[in-house]
Image (tube, coloured by chain):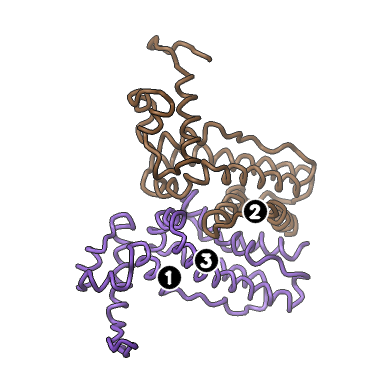
Chain colours: A purple, B brown
Amino acid sequence: MRTSTQAGGRPRESRVDHAIQTTVRELLAEVGYANLTMDLVAARAGIGKAAIYRRHSSKAEMVFSAVVHGMDLQPVADTGSLRTDLRDTVIDVLGRVAEPSVRAGTPTFLAELAVNKEMSARFQSTLVARETACVETVLDRAVARGEISHKPDPAVVHATILGTVTAWLHMLQRDDYADLPDQLADILTNGLTGS
Amino acid sequence: MRTSTQAGGRPRESRVDHAIQTTVRELLAEVGYANLTMDLVAARAGIGKAAIYRRHSSKAEMVFSAVVHGMDLQPVADTGSLRTDLRDTVIDVLGRVAEPSVRAGTPTFLAELAVNKEMSARFQSTLVARETACVETVLDRAVARGEISHKPDPAVVHATILGTVTAWLHMLQRDDYADLPDQLADILTNGLTGS
């Protein structure tokens, strides 16, 4: 348990932050976003509601913090080839999108994004920016290796990966995604190196 | 105004169906899915609520019918090249996804899809199946021309198109999509022909 002292002198209570995050992720997977309430989180985590509201102004904001907090948003290890770097990147994105608490929360999260400008800005500046940076690193390596002659727009390549994975799970509602990383990496690698 | 007689002898009242569809699409673009109600549709269309409920068991079902009804889900004209066929297909999909009433309703529609199995089955068997068939026609033409040696899974190629377009508008929340059809068609064409 780590505690430190803020300017105001109050302990940071990182144990409380951690308990909220863990509880929110558990409850998302168990009851889904629609049925998750601040009351349920408070009861399960053994924390007062006031302590939750001090940290999170809304359920949506609390869920976003909890879900993004645990994510490892680093570029994949350099495998020496664009194809396997892209495959590993798709596996990473798919792992995040298919994770039960994220999958359960995504549809309502997208509805919230459409009406909540602050949440949208935070999503763009955290998850989207960091995933796009990971894709850009992979593309930069391929340029350095001479595999591609000019770097495509990383935002478009990222949208292709995030979008295909999200459409597969949430629009086509398919659970058979074991082959998707190889299929998508093949299309993208040929697509980016063939021009 | 077209009327015909059903088995029960009641006129089909296609004028009423048409009025509901038109009104729903107008209201979606004006007030958004969340604020759209059966009452609002009834008042604007000048139709009794009972007449709406006879046709549509829920708001979600009514909106889905109205939005899908007007869609032209035919394969693009054969341009003689996979690249332009794919570009035109992306333009078609983007046109549907970015259409104001569809764009306004998509986030809540996806939330509804996640919990409404009947709606999901209907979405898969109508829009998804027909869009995938359009993509398959484009791929079959490319095989017949000798542009690609073996046909990839049309569901994956369709997910790449629908997913990228949807992610661009609803996850990245970007409105600059004029270049997207060419960018995506370039990646996909090279990706499918380069293997």
Q: Is residue B49 left or right of residue A167?
A: left
Chain where mark 3 sits: A
Which residue was labeled with disc 2? B177
Q: Earlier in the sequence, mark 3 or mark 1?
A: 1
Q: Are tags 3 and 1 found on a single chain?
A: yes
Give amino acid for label 3: Gln
The quadrant of the rendering that contains the C terminus of chain A is: bottom right
Q: Secondary structure at mark 3?
A: helix
- The vertical placement of B113 against A131, above or below, is above
- The vertical placement of A130 against B169, above or below, is below
Q: Which is nearer the eye, B5 or B41?
A: B41
At label 2, counting other C-alpha atoms closer than 10 Å, the crowd grade (few under 14, some 14-19, many 20 or more) is: some
Q: Secondary structure at mark 1?
A: helix
Query: Residue B108: horizontal and vertical position, in percent?
Result: 42, 48
Q: Nearer the viewer, mark 2 or mark 1?
A: 2
Task: Give the distance between the C-alpha atoms of the residues marked 2 and 1, in whole angstroms.
Answer: 27 Å
Task: Give the distance between the C-alpha atoms of the residues marked 3 and 2, in whole angstroms.
Answer: 17 Å
Residue lying farthest front?
A8
Give amino acid for label 2: Tyr
At label 3, counting other C-alpha atoms closer than 10 Å, the crowd grade (few under 14, some 14-19, many 20 or more) is: some
Which residue was labeled with disc 3? A124
Q: Are tags 3 and 2 found on a single chain?
A: no
Q: Residue at x 45, y 73 (%)?
A: A71
- Label of residue A68 in the image: 1
